Image (cartoon, rainbow, N blue to C red):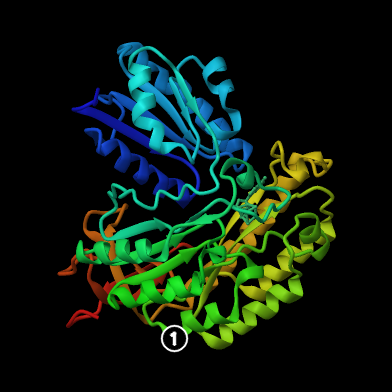
Amino acid sequence: MVVTDKKIYIETYGCQMNVADSEVVLGILGNEGYAPINSPETADLILVNTCSVRDNAEKRVHQRLTELRAYKQNNPEVLIGVLGCMAERLRTELIEKNNVVDIVVGPDEYRKLPKLVEDAYAGQRGIAVKLSRVESYDDITPLRTEGITAWLSVMRGCDKFCTFCVVPFTRGRERSRTLTSVVEEVRKLSEQGVKEVTLLGQNVNSYKDSNYDFTDLLQEVASVDRTMRIRYTTSHPQDMSDKLIEVMAKNDNICKYIHLPVQSGSDRILKLMNRTYTIDHYLNLMKKIRLAMPEVAFSTDIISGFPTETVEDHQMTLEVMKEVRYDGAYMFKYSPRENTKAWNMNDDVDDKEKGRRLNEIVLLQEAISNEINQSMIGKTVKILVENDSSRSSDDLMGRTDTNKKVVFPRGNALIGEYRTVTIERATAHTLIGTLTAGENA
Ligand code: 5AD
Ligand code: SF4
């Protein structure tokens, strides 16, 4: 039986890989006649695509599942499914302990969704959580809803096994899509008017398709349409090759923005984290990148309170932040995750102290981001107009090549255009300006 005329609502938590996966899921179920809607009220199928990277991400999803129970109580025909990393990690527990869940599907089993949904309608709850060494959804066309920007996952899984991270266990081994299919998808997106593509992978620099590596892929993708911006994330500092820096520098449409998680400023902690680089290596890498691309912007991830982290280790993290002067950072308290190596280490920095250190990290980053943004006042920047501003319908929002958000009165600008804006004010997170008179950028 093919299910038709059903409405599907999907809620996505966690990283951009999950956002891209949700679009794959909508693509797969779209072929079965499911139409996506933006709220759960009238949905026949409610899916929650989940994240396990920290305990509070999981807590939020548990809470949300409790709320979603109401839709099932109103209409027992409604099905609820849990997708993604929590499905992989918790498996049967989700169905057994939480009687709202009908389907549990891990990140490599989305092709089974139509069958699982059909079985669930027939009263049989289903679980599919096998990880695969080959699944890359290479042939699935994701159903995108984001307008002129697109996320495109080019590889899945991670083989790095950082000792704090659950991803290798929930998303499995590294595997890549074929270069030809990625390039073809980018070509189609360009024809559809998409203006910016972000190549995604948990560890995107490990992309490999026979003799092609990530730099080959990036070069090919950048050559498809020179009016299209190309971004990528996430890089591991160990895998930022000279060739990659060269490809970025010589292609104008590859954005000069790199997310390069440092995690900690202490070599001793980095070693315990199995990050495989030293701060010396990291800082030299940054210097090399800045030499090749003086305008480059960096962001990072930082964890506070990893096992055995001392106040001195923490201080070293602050020093690295001051030295690099990141444009932005994602900052977290260490959260022990089952199965990881660090799970067996003593989580000895108490929560209050983790919070105190995190607060210092956040305040320092805010100050640096603010200073960098204040220094932009008076400058004219080229932006891609992305969408309406979330704050006011009179304003539009665009981004610079270096990924800075710029808000400005809409004037005659249209979404999808490149325009220039002169910056007049700035906060730590946003630049505010006005359109420069005259032609498009
Ligand atoms: N605790 C805190 N932060 C974590 N991250 C990954 N695992 C954990 C954890 N157990 C952070 C890392 C990673 C980002 C995606 O999430 O900084 O780069
Ligand atoms: Fe996790 Fe490390 Fe892999 Fe990133 S590189 S997904 S932090 S194991």
**In the picture, which quadrant includes the N terminus?**
top left
Closer to the camera in the image, 127 or 251 = 127
Task: Work out whether residue 407 can be spotted.
Answer: no
Q: Is residue 5 above or below residue 231?
A: above
Between 397 and 124, the residue placed more toward the observer is: 124
> Which residue bears the numbered disc 1?
250
Left or right: residue 181 versus residue 245 is left
Q: For the view shown, which residue lies furthest in the front direction?
A: 210
User: In the image, residue 395 lies at what x, y percent?
Assistant: 25, 60
Q: Quadrant of residue 153?
A: bottom left
Residue 364 occupies which quadrant of the picture?
bottom right
Whether residue 403 is visible here, answered yes or no, is yes
Q: Callout 1: 10 Å neighbours few (<14), some, many (20+)? A: few
Mark 1: amino acid: Lys
Residue, x 53% and y 32% (percent of image)?
129
When the figure is inspected, residue 316 is found, relative to residue 167, above or below; the finding is below
Side of 390 relative to 126 (left or right): left
In this view, 440 is above or below 48: below
Q: Residue at x 45, y 21 (%)?
A: 126
Element class at badge 1: helix
202, 315: nearer the viewer: 202
- When the figure is inspected, residue 435 is found, relative to residue 405, above or below; the finding is below
Residue 140: image location, x then y, percent: 33, 48
364 or 96, nearer to the observer:
96
The location of residue 346, given as percent across then percent down, is 84, 41
The residue carrying mark 1 has its beta carbon less than 8 Å from ligand 2: no
Quadrant of image for the C terminus: bottom left
- The residue at the point 27 percent across, 58 percent down is 387
| Residue shown at the point (49%, 74%) measured from the top left | 215
User: From this viewpoint, which residue is outermost toward the left?
Assistant: 412
